[in-house]
């Protein structure tokens, strides 16, 4: 069911899973494409609050994030939220090597006491946007570090220790 899709978006520099975002945007695309931003944000917030817990104090932040995603969806210009800190992406469809790389990264992060945002990108279309020609692939702060292999643990420690 597309309505049950969970999409990761950034809200206040945090990665948050939202249920039903794609379905809501698809339903609203034609009718809300030319409406004012505040109306679009309010409507998305209303629809998505039915299936997602959104605390009252951060509802304006969620509305802003939903609006950004809606503009992206429509192909309109939008302002991306810039993440803070260390950003790690594992690219791979969920094969044992890809999952193993993600687990190894989490272990190394715990060992060296590194706080980082780690995301496992499994969608083939999304992976293609990074221009890598093999999986698993590892991207740290926007830089491709490995493609088509799981780097040895000592290399992961080296790369991540540089960020502390």
Image (cartoon, rainbow, N blue to C red):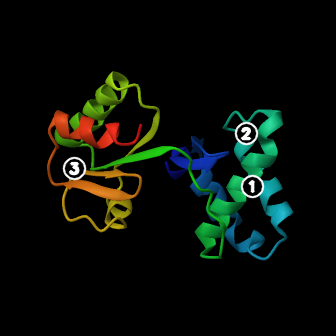
Q: First in sequence, mark 3 or 1: give its number.
A: 1
Crowding at dot 3, Cα within 10 Å, few <14 / some 14-19 / many 20+, comes out as: many
Q: Do tag 3 and tag 1 residues touch (Cβ < 8 Å)?
A: no
User: Residue 80 in the image: x percent, y percent?
Assistant: 61, 62
Question: Left or right of 63: which side holds 129?
Answer: left
29, 42: nearer the viewer: 42
Where is mark 1, residue-wise?
Answer: 64
In the image, residue 118 lies at what x, y percent?
42, 40
Q: Does residue 116 appear to the left or right of 16 in the view shown?
A: left
The answer to whether the residue labelled 2 contacts the one labelled 1, judged by CB atoms less than 8 Å apart, is: no
Quickly name the residue at label 3.
Answer: 136
Is residue 67 depicted above or below 74 in this figure? above
How far apart in space, not on screen, are marks 2 and 1 (Cα)? Answer: 17 Å
Identified at 72% across, 60% down, the residue is: 67
Question: Viewed as shown, does residue 137 lie left or right of 80?
Answer: left
Residue tagged 2 = 50
Identify the residue at horizontal 56%, vertical 50% (top origin): 83
Could you tell me how far apart the alpha carbons at marks 3 and 2 are, in whole angstroms? 36 Å
Q: Earlier in the sequence, mark 3 or mark 2?
A: 2
SS at badge 2: loop
Secondary element at tag 1 = helix
Within 10 Å of the Cα at label 2, are there few (<14), some (14-19), or many (20+) other Cα atoms? few
Could you tell me residue 87's position as x and y percent? 44, 47
Which image quarter holds the C terminus? Answer: top left
| Image quadrant in which you'd find residue 145 | bottom left
Residue ID at (70%, 33%)? 53
Name the foreground residue: 98 vs 109: 109
Give the total of numbered labels: 3
Which label lies toward us, 3 or 2?
A: 3
Nearer to me, 131 or 28? 131
Residue at the location (70% across, 46% down)? 48
Examine the image and state in which quarter residue 52 appears: top right
């Amino acid at each position: 069911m597309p309505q049950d899709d969970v999409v990761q978006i950034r809200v206040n520099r945090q990665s948050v899973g939202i249920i039903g975002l794609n379905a809501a945007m698809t339903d609203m695309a034609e009718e809300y494409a030319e409406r004012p931003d505040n109306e679009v944000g309010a409507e998305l917030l209303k629809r998505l609050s039915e299936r997602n817990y959104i605390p009252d104090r951060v509802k304006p932040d969620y509305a802003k994030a939903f609006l950004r995603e809606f503009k992206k969806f429509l192909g309109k210009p939008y302002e991306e939220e810039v993440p803070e800190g260390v950003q790690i992406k594992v690219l791979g469809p969920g094969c044992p090597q890809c999952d193993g790389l993600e687990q190894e990264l989490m272990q190394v992060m715990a060992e060296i006491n590194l706080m980082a945002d780690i995301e496992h990108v499994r969608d083939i279309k999304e992976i293609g946007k990074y221009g890598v020609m093999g999986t698993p692939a590892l991207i740290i702060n926007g830089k491709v570090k490995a493609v088509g292999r799981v780097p040895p643990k000592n290399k992961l420690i080296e790369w991540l220790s540089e960020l502390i």
